[in-house]
């Protein structure tokens, strides 16, 4: 069966099977959006009677619920996971994490990349932006302009805005954190006054042959906000079995799943553009307000959402904007779900364009603030540059023009 016939038959199956629709909302590497109940795993995905290659699934939304606006307690795990819960202790070579979703975990010390903690009652919050979910998500995913960099450095962020650069975290107890500073001194820090701790970790271990047989890594977001990076062992109508480096195989009931998306690991053929530093990023303001592009966040620093659709990865911009990315010259495709951010409450009107080596390969009609997300799947050929342009709409105004290039990805062909 040719590729074209396959996708036509897949859409036909879904159209004739209303019982399947209203389950999962799936973005495919072809730049198509389909609905149905996805099952399977390493051997390929099943959607109705159709089979889909594992690598062809970019994103699966299990629930329309948006992510939490913030996270009071969270633990960063080496490799790009984030657990909603509390770091109870680090003693010797072990760590204890109390997870809201999966209970008490005994982990290796080297797996802990940091944590975020609430302030004690009565203390005012001086760093509210550090608790925003968009900030935590970008920190875990390695977004190109992430504020926090857990796993890459050791920094203590105090509630009073002070920061302490450390060489090593020696111990984390219920009341104190013992750190070694750059001058080799060992200092205790009162844990009650620590807002965020970033801990440098060794590189993640290379995948084993058994890991690679399971297929590419995915990141699973739970409804409570957790981000679990791992490989799918099995997805059934009832549960997802996910293998992670830090807690082995874990069975997660479908009812707790929010979204699953490609981790875009090397060799996967997927590159989320929010994880890449642009070669050029320009915003030309209509008046005096500057709106620089933001990665994995709306341009207004909120969690991205188009209509009723939450967006975990993407680029938030404001008209007029132009962002250029360097490509490797290999045949590729640009995929996105694009539209005006829901925070504008229906305001805004833009025209969006996609250029490959300066040549227009896609152009939208006028996109209004209350429009649902537009699916983009366009071949770039062997282009060496990709440029995303957002201009004023027919209204000739930039009011409310907060635009999201949601799930913006370059996919190898």
Image (tube, helix red, strand yellow):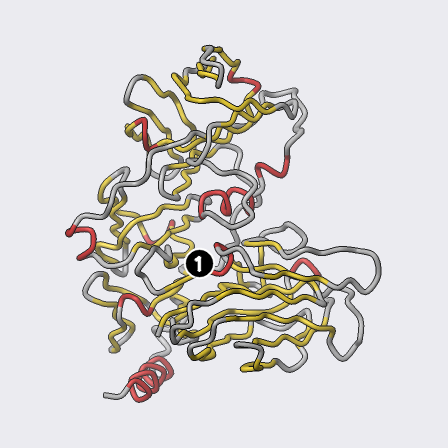
Q: Nearer the viewer, residue 21 or 136?
A: 136
Left or right: where does residue 341 sit relative to residue 272? Answer: right
**Viewer-proximal residue among 36 and 34:** 34
The answer to which quarter of the image holds residue 47 is: bottom left
**Residue 97 rendering spot, x and y as whole percentages:** 36, 28
- Give the answer, above or below, for where 172 lies relative to 330: above
Residue beneath the point at 60% across and 65% down: 323
Residue displayed at 38% across by 34% down:
99
Eyeballing the image, is 197 above or below 362?
above
157 w.r.t. 186: above or below: below
Q: Nearer the viewer, residue 10 or 63?
A: 10
Residue 385 spot, x, y in % from top left = 52, 71
- What is the count of numbered marks? 1
Q: Is residue 262 left or right of residue 341?
A: left
Quarter of the image containing the N terminus?
bottom left
**Badge 1, how many Cα within 10 Å: few under 14, some, many 20+?**
many
Q: Is residue 299 above or below residue 206?
A: below
Query: Residue 336 in the image: x percent, y percent?
Result: 50, 69
Q: Residue at x 37, y 32 (%)?
A: 201
Q: Quadrant of the C terminus?
A: bottom left
Q: Position of residue 258 (x, y in %)?
A: 42, 54
Among all residues in the image, which is located at the extreme left?
210
Q: Which residue is mark 1?
A: 63
Residue at x 42%, y 72% (from the top left corner): 329
Q: Toward which corner of the image does residue 42 lie, by quadrant?
A: bottom left
Q: Which type of secondary structure does the marked residue at label 1 adopt?
A: loop
């Amino acid at each position: 069966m040719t590729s074209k016939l396959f996708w036509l038959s897949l859409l036909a199956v879904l159209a004739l099977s209303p019982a399947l629709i209203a389950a999962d909302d799936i973005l495919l590497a072809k730049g198509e959006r389909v609905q149905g109940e996805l099952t399977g795993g390493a051997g390929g995905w099943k959607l109705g009677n159709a089979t889909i290659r594992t690598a062809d699934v970019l994103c699966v939304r299990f629930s329309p619920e948006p992510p939490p606006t913030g996270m009071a307690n969270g633990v960063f795990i080496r490799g790009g996971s984030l657990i909603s819960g509390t770091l109870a202790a680090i003693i010797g070579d072990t760590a204890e994490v109390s997870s809201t979703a999966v209970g008490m975990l005994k982990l290796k010390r080297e797996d802990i990349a940091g944590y975020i903690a609430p302030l004690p009652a009565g203390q005012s919050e001086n760093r509210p932006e550090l608790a925003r979910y968009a900030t935590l998500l970008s920190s875990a995913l390695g977004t190109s302009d992430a504020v926090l960099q857990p796993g890459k450095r050791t920094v203590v962020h105090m509630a009073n805005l002070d920061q302490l650069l450390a060489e090593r975290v020696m111990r984390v107890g219920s009341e104190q954190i013992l750190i070694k500073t750059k001058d080799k001194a060992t200092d205790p820090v009162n844990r009650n006054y620590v807002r965020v701790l970033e801990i440098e970790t060794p590189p993640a271990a290379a995948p084993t042959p058994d890991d690679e047989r399971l297929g590419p890594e995915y990141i699973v977001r739970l409804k409570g906000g957790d981000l679990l990076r791992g490989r799918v062992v099995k997805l059934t109508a009832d549960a997802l079995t996910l293998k992670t480096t830090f807690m082995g195989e874990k069975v997660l009931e479908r009812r707790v799943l929010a979204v699953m998306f490609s981790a875009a690991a090397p060799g996967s053929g997927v590159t989320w553009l929010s994880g890449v530093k642009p070669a050029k990023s320009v915003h030309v303001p209509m008046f005096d307000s500057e709106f620089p592009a933001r990665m994995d966040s709306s341009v207004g620093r909120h969690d991205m959402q188009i209509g009723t659709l939450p967006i975990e990865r993407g680029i938030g911009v404001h008209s007029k904007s132009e962002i250029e990315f360097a490509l490797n010259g290999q045949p590729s495709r640009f995929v996105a779900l694009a539209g005006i951010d829901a925070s504008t409450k229906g305001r805004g009107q833009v025209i969006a364009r996609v250029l490959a080596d300066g040549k227009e390969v896609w152009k939208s009609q006028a996109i209004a603030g209350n429009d649902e997300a537009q699916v983009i799947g366009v071949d770039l050929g062997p282009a060496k540059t990709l440029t995303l342009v957002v201009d004023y709409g027919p209204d000739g105004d930039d009011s409310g023009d907060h635009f999201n290039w949601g799930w913006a990805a370059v996919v190898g062909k």
